Image (cartoon, helix red, strand yellow):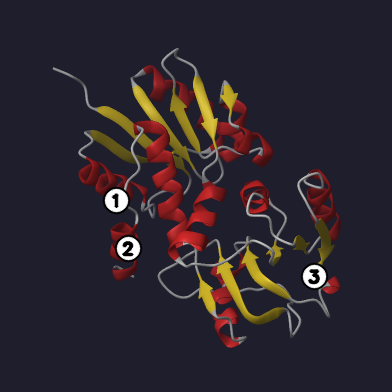
Amino acid sequence: MTQIDQYAVFGSPIKHSKSPTIHRIFAEQTGQELVYTAQEVTADRFESAVTEFFRLGGQGLNCTVPLKELAWRFADRKTERADSAKAVNTLALQTDGSILGDNTDGIGLVTDLIVNHEVTLNGKKLLILGAGGASRGILSPLFEQQPACIVIANRTASKAVNLADEFADRGDIKGCGFDELAGLSFDVILNATSASLSNDLPPLPEGLLAPNGVCYDLAYGNELTAFVRWGISHGAASSLDGLGMLVEQAAEAFFIWRGIRPDTAPVIELLNSER
């Protein structure tokens, strides 16, 4: 009897994860036979849990908070986008037994913006709020769209400046504190902090969003996040959350594992209808 291919998402907390539902639908859609589970794994247990998962025949893993940097260190080799992010959310067993690490977050974001919402990034002025791992993971894919410039703003300005310096060879990028945003305006504002889920926002000056500008919160919830509400109240042409990004990054991981690209639209529609 052939064993069914095993996949999973590791993280802590993980009970809320929509990934098992997403990958089950992808598998049904594409006629793939696999099992995908969500497993509570803390940072101190990560290495032993991943080693055991692959030893028992696991084929691929997603890694979420707080495990992405640990997954980057664990992988035997990394894609270029994973290395520039210094974080991995997708581990894939290779035919030679090695483990490939990839980061599908950035491509998930860009696909959701460009394909699902028809947002143009080429030639646009982009602002990223926050200078943590989420920001780092999306910078390379954003630069591939050839924006006019990217500004990273963070409570601790030096962290934003240092991150911008790392990507200075990719294009026009600078880092600053939130207090330096006054008088500037941007076509697309991306919230890469988790603050808006707890109803908190950085101090954003009036006039920050250009006419017909777009707001996008990488986080998502059953209710509108504080940043999505901010975008609506400031006249955004679209103010979006990260549910589509979640599904698109999952589709990219599915493609890495199975070599087939699922249709994301019905999955996004289903998850939207459930909240």
- CA neighbours of label 2 inside 10 A, class few (<14), some (14 to 19), many (20+): some
**In the picture shown, does residue 66 fall above or below 176?**
above
Residue type at mark 2 is Leu
Q: Position of residue 24 (x, y in %)?
A: 26, 45
Identity of the residue drawn at 47% across and 75% down: 224
Quarter occupied by residue 1: top left
Classify residue 184 as left or right of residue 254: right
Could you tell which of marks 1 and 3 lies nearer the N-terminus? 1
Dot 3: element = helix
| Residue holding disc 1 | 21
Q: Looking at the image, which is closer to me, 275 or 206?
A: 206
- Residue 178's label in the rendered image is 3
Could you tell which of marks 1 and 2 lies nearer the N-terminus? 1
Q: Marks 1 and 3, Cα distance to the nearest angstrom?
A: 38 Å
Identity of the residue drawn at 69% across and 59% down: 147
Residue type at mark 1 is Thr
Q: Position of residue 267 (x, y in %)?
A: 31, 57
- CA neighbours of label 1 inside 10 A, class few (<14), some (14 to 19), many (20+): some
Q: Marks 1 and 2, Cα distance to the nearest angstrom?
A: 9 Å
| Residue holding disc 2 | 271
- CA neighbours of label 3 inside 10 A, class few (<14), some (14 to 19), many (20+): some
Badges 1 and 3: C-beta atoms under 8 Å apart? no
Q: Position of residue 81 (x, y in %)?
A: 61, 38
Badges 1 and 2: C-beta atoms under 8 Å apart? yes
